[in-house]
Amino acid sequence: GNFVINNASIVDNSGKIIAKSNVLVNSKKIYQNAAYSDTGIYATNIGLVAKEDIENIGGNIVADNNVSIYSENGDIKNSKKLSIHENDYHNVFTDVRGSGDIVGNKISIVANNVENLGADIKAQDKIQIGARKNLVIGNLEAVDKKVKNGGKDFVLDEKKTNVGSNLKAKDISLTSLGNVGIIGSNVVADNKMNIEAKGDIAIVAGKDSTLHEEKHSKSKGFGRSESSTDIAYATHNVASNIIGDKVNIASEKNISLLGSNVQANTKGQIKADGNITQAGVKDTNYSYHKKTKTGFMGLTSKSVTDENYAEKAILSATLAGDKGLKYDSKNNLILSGVKVVSSGNINLKGNNVEINPLETKSYNKHEEVKKGFSGSFSPKGISVSYGKDKLESKTDILNQTASQIVSNKDINIEATDKVRAKSVDIYAKNDVNISGDNGVEISTANNT
């Protein structure tokens, strides 16, 4: 049968609502918070209507047919429920208390602000999400940390992991009268992918990180001691991926694609009335090691320090099939550290068009410091002095990773002002046409 609630003030569910046919809830506010992993609403069709906010934290909303979630004048928030615990030993771990999945044949979500964090939305047919203000398909962060602290021995291992959202359907439409933000998440359509905003569209990477810190000290008597410190820290970007057979991304303001990828299996278009900026990102690795030995009563000592830092270029990729790929900016089109590939034509258009490499840095630093007595012989006798000596070396490296524009047909690059291309590989099976009304500048960036 049906499960119906009409004109309630607040509906708050932490258990299970199950109906063979329909679940229809009409309330001022609707809340669902997972007390168990299977907390949720299950039916053939599900309709949730609120005058104000609808919030689902970790609960499931699962329909065999259609899901409609509508707020008349409030916000909708859907989120995976993560629980972060700390025990008596200061260890931290994260577990999933509730998935926050929304599943159906057709799914419609409309509100002032719509936010989906780390949760999956899956439809066999369509996903349609509309925001009167802002729309965010975002991520959460899981933290795992282990600490061993024995006074003179300290070891810390910490891992932070991006928990992204996943949207999947035959057709997906994300529209906003304000901004659209997609962070560390995947949005995958088998057929049509449409992302439109009157404001800005930002599709950016999330981030994973690992930290290892280790400190040891040992006393040997008479003021003698040894100590060591080791630190290793690494970051890894987690791309947002926008995938469809036909992909359209359009903004009446600006579009930013940072460390993320777009794949259009047949045809792709990225269009903005403002700027289009696409750029790669950098994974990083840092290490630090210091070892110190102190002699009798601390009068002598020696410390050796090694420090290393390296960035790795991660290109932002846009791929399209035989129907081609088009970037169209009414202002500036800026591509830095990108891979743009199509088996069809590639058209890049803007007021100014800039194609740049992605610059990465690395360095290695070694330092030795000695403190103590030193002696010398001369005709006047023996001279003894006490002081500090320091030996230091450092190597800095700067690398440029070229952008790549590759087409199995033609490449057309057109600017109403200037085209500036630096350290870019441009390859077309047929023709390459580059034009700027006020000139074309092609240059090379140097590694150092």
Image: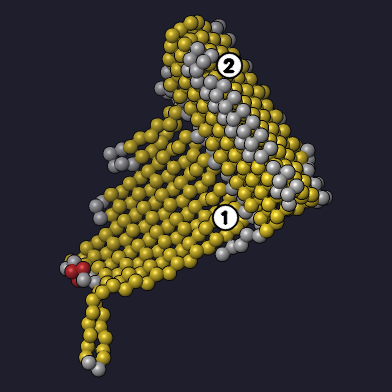
Q: Residue at x 52, y 58 (%)?
A: 361
Name the spot of residue 345 as percent of width and height, x first.
78, 43
Q: Quadrant of residue 320?
A: top right
Residue under numbered circle 2: 68
Q: Which type of secondary structure does the marked residue at label 1 adopt?
A: strand
Residue type, mark 1 in image: Glu
Q: Residue furthest bottom?
A: 379
Q: Tell which circle, 1 or 2, labels the residue nearer the N-terminal end.
A: 2
Q: Residue drawn 53% across and 20% down?
A: 112
Residue 173, horizontal then vertical, whole percent: 64, 26
Residue 53's label in the rendered image is none
Residue 226 visible here: yes
258 lies above or below 284: above
Q: Is residue 56 left or right of residue 408?
A: left
Q: Position of residue 233 (x, y in %)?
A: 43, 52
Q: Which residue is mark 1?
A: 359
Secondary structure type for disc 2: strand
Mark yes or no: residue 407 visible: no
For the C terminus, the quadrant is bottom right
